[in-house]
Image (spheres, grey):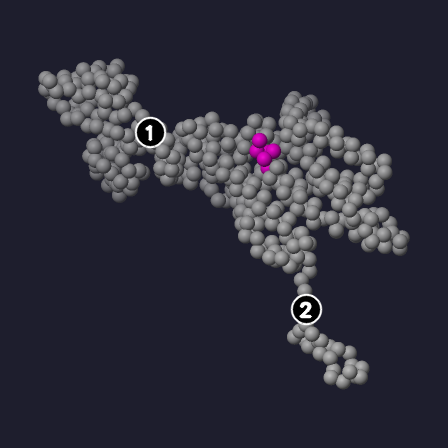
Amino acid sequence: MSLDAKPKVADDQSSKEVAKLDKDEYVQGDSLWMDSWKRLRRNRAAVIGGAIIIINIVLAILAPLLSPYSYQEQELDTNNAAPLWIINMFPVMKAADQTQTLRPITDWQVQIETGQTVQQGTVLARNEDGDTIDAIMDGTAFVDGSTVGVTQANIQFYEINDDWEVLLNNLDLMRPVDPGTVIARNGSEEITVQQRSNVDIGQTSIRVKEQDGGYVKVTDDYAIGTDHLGRDMLVRIMYGARISLAVAFVGPLVSFMVGLGVGLTSGYAGGWLDNVLMRIVDIMYAFPTLLLIILLMAFFRNSFADADPGSFRYLMGQADAALGGMLFIFIGIGITSWMSLARLTRGQVLSVREQEYIEAARSIGTDRLTIVRQHVLPNILGPIVVAETLTIPVYISYEAFLSFIGLGVNPPTPSWGAMINDGAEAIATYPFQALFPALALFFVMFAFNFLGDGLRDALDPRMRGVD
């Protein structure tokens, strides 16, 4: 009912009629959860974060259906390849020459001349069946016997005839020629190499191409290129989302199962049990969390590697291998993820267990388990959910770091951390191999941060009714 609504009172003060409100003056109020949902929807950062998370979940689930390539099949012929838009985005990357052999040469008609400047899509050769070989990039075209191609390197062509004396032999032409080397001479006229170049001498021409002409294979078959083994980067990033999202949900699940139970028991029971449980938490906190996870992962990897068939260790190792190395990661993160939640839960329980409604429940003989389940837990769940949501990026970063240092998932299972590690080794020449998995990790972690901040504001009862 609106506070501004004014009841209609009869003019006759002696009237015994009860004051009533008109029907149109009734205002439907919002519950706490509905008001929280409305505030969450008005938080644009939280909505964007939620949308990014949903998109990643969909891509992770539909990854096998969204690409014809596998995340593990190696195509060494297309390793370190990238589409032209990526090459143009990084000045350090230079496209390798496009070359195509015409077989058989008699079936093809060359449509360009050596030294001709061509644009992407220009027809280089055409056969009788109407098939064409098109330029995949802008550059200078060349014809070399039965091979046509395009290069973006600085290339020069010199016309020669019988009056020219060639000063290089076949052995000299097998390796790059140093600057200042004279290639051919005609009296006082000379052809000299200005930069370290590859030289090709024909019957009527000499071709000089800078050695630093390009090294990245150009292909549009892969949206964001391939890694050093020729595997599709986009597909591996989508499969890598499965690993990060699995950790994002398993970590809080384990934390809730263990930390919530320990915190509720410790906070409500009190006494010696509270002291014992909190001392265990203190001992766990004495170890740096990340270092403890690393030690656990190293222990698991070494202890379960050579177990006897049929033993428990062997079964655990087989289960971990079947999950691509994820089982031990779940165990390692689970062992260290519950302490913070246990402390938070205990503090929340201590703040509500002496409230009047708890005393009222005790006074009518309600047992402890029912009080905890029906009165304590519902009143502390909001802050706990928010706090655990804000720790999800920490779990994701743990998994990425473990994979980065080689203690995470087993190859060829893709992980963003492992992909960043592989890309970092070639970041000077192929920066895109580290950039795109790093961006995927960045966006997902920030998405969970934005969503957690939005949930914190939305579930805060003090923010009710505040935009």
Residue at 38% across / 37% down in the picture? Answer: 89
Left or right, 405 with respect to 194, comes to right
Residue bearing the label numbered 2: 2
User: Considering the image in quadrants, where does the N terminus appear?
Assistant: bottom right
- Residue 79 in view here: no
Label 1 Cα neighbours within 10 Å, binned few <14 / some 14-19 / many ≥20: some
Residue 122 in the image: x percent, y percent? 26, 41
Judged from the image, the secondary structure of the residue bearing numbered disc 2 is: loop
For badge 1, the amino acid type reads Gly
User: Considering the image in quadrants, where does the C terminus appear?
Assistant: bottom right
Residue bearing the label numbered 1: 214
Residue at 80% across / 40% down in the picture? Answer: 266
Judged from the image, the secondary structure of the residue bearing numbered disc 1 is: loop
For badge 2, the amino acid type reads Ser
Sequence-wise, the earlier of marks 2 and 1 is: 2
Residue at 56% across / 45% down in the picture? Answer: 447
Report the front residue among 35 and 255: 35
Residue 346 in the image: x percent, y percent? 76, 41
Position of residue 111 relative to residue 374, above or below, is above
Q: CA distance from mark 2 to mark 1?
A: 73 Å
Report the front residue among 201 and 387: 387
Position of residue 366 relative to residue 158, above or below, is below
Q: Which residues are magenta?
A: 396-401
Report the front residue among 220 and 95: 95
Is 123 magenta? The answer is no
Residue 166 in the image: x percent, y percent? 17, 17
Residue at 50% across / 36% down in the picture? Answer: 438
Q: For residue 221, which quarter of the picture?
A: top left
Count how many numbered circles sit on residues in the image. Answer: 2
Report the front residue among 65 and 176: 176
What main secondary structure does the magenta stretch of the protein show? helix
